[in-house]
Amino acid sequence: MGFEFSTKATYQKYFNKSHDLFRKSAKDFVKKEIKPFIDEWEEAGTFPRELYKKAGEVGLLGVGYPEEYGGTPGDIFFQIANFEEMARTGSLGLAAALGVLNIGIPPILKLGTKEQKKKFIPKVLSGERIAGLGITEPSGGSDVANLKTTAVKKGDYYIVNGSKTFITAGNRADQITCAVRTGGEGPHGISLLVIESATPGFSAPTQLKKMGWWPSDTAEIFFDNCKVPVANLLGEENKGFYGIMQNFQFERLQIAVMANTTAEMAYEEALKYSKERKAFGKTLAGFQVNRHKLVDMATLIEVSKEFTYRIAAKIDAGVDQVKEISMAKNFACDVSDKVTNHAVQIFGGYGYMRGFLVERLYRDNRILSLGGGTTEIMKEIISKYIL
């Protein structure tokens, strides 16, 4: 199950038989619907849109969401099990694109009216529609409070102008939960709007070419006098920044889980290879330097996973964990950086070759310390709590 070196007691602190049954369902889906095609999709830089519908039909998209909107309620560890198994496709790009609803839908669920929830959630959970999140802008990056996309109210509509970049699933998303400026400068002038891609003036003309995450369609989105109904405003006008910050907490948890799983897969590949590959008359595992490297990798992963799970349990209990999840994201990304680097080193030249999982993990890993707020932004957040 991907927990070969984790203690059973640690795992059982957070996951029970119900989680295990769900995990098996997710694993079976990956085995049947994704694994046979993943290398082809990686090279193509995309995957079939129908995969969303297939995932929706077996309940993978709706896990953790209310039943009244087509979801399957459950605690946060059902979602974590899902994140882990999707990452275990070996393609973080596919996992991110397929799971993009988990950053696009929560603001609607938390801030939206009943009518908005009925309109924008059920078809996403069923896989009929794709929901993304539009925060980052070309000029601002992590500086969310100074975003430039404007939404000027005119009667029953907002006229939206500006652009977003690095938007996961942005090329084929049907709706984007978008941060816009409706008021003055700074965080207190920001609102959240749901903008549908069918809106005249909405365009995502090209798929951005990235170092990794190849199957994830990442886009720059442009808004040219888009008329968005005032009815699509989530929560109160000029109060959207708080919703963004709340959403970041869960997004950072997802990234920490993804980083831990990436590290775990790289470790497993390196461990297996070190037992098989021979050099100078013995296996790579026969050299102390490699054994100790593997021990360090295993130790770091154990610590990071336990820390992430503990924080997830507190988030699920309603305890504010802004400082802690920022720490967990940074720690998990540092661990994944080290472990994927060590794995490539153990593989030697083969670790640099396409067709070997550690090569893809090494590439895909690099974005994790940038997405959801950079390492440096996380440190700034943490510093405000400890100084």
Image: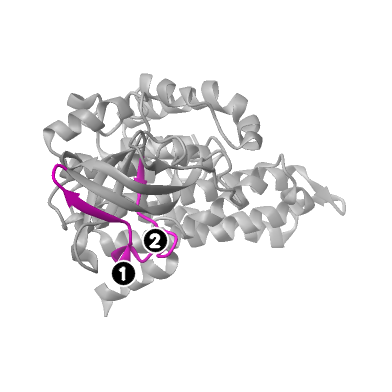
Q: Secondary structure at mark 2?
A: loop
Q: Is residue 60 placed above or below 209 in the rendered structure? A: above
Magenta range is 132-156
Q: Position of residue 136 (x, y in %)?
A: 39, 56
Q: Quadrant of the C terminus?
A: bottom left
Query: Which residue is disc 2 drawn over?
Result: 373
Q: Secondary structure at mark 1?
A: helix
Q: Position of residue 315 (x, y in %)?
A: 24, 51
Q: Position of residue 271 (x, y in %)?
A: 65, 47
User: Which mark lies nearer to you, 2 or 1?
Assistant: 2
Q: Residue at x 39, y 61 (%)?
A: 373
Residue closest to the eye, 151 or 99: 151
Q: Quadrant of residue 137?
A: bottom left
Q: Which mark is residue 318?
A: none
Q: Is residue 366 placed above or below 27 in the rendered structure? A: below
Residue closest to the eye, 94 or 21: 94
The CA span between labels 2 and 1 is 10 Å
Does 106 lie within the magenta span?
Answer: no
Residue 217 vs residue 287: left or right? left
Q: 10 Å neighbourhood of mark 1: few (<14), some, or many (≥20)?
A: some
Q: Is residue 300 visible?
A: yes
Q: Residue at x 31, y 33 (%)?
A: 16
Q: Are marks 2 and 1 in contact (CB under 8 Å)?
A: yes
Question: Which circle's residue, 2 or 1, is located before the other in the chain?
Answer: 2
Residue 179 vs residue 81: left or right? left
Q: Label 1 is placed on what type of residue?
A: Ile
Q: Which mark is residue 381?
A: 1
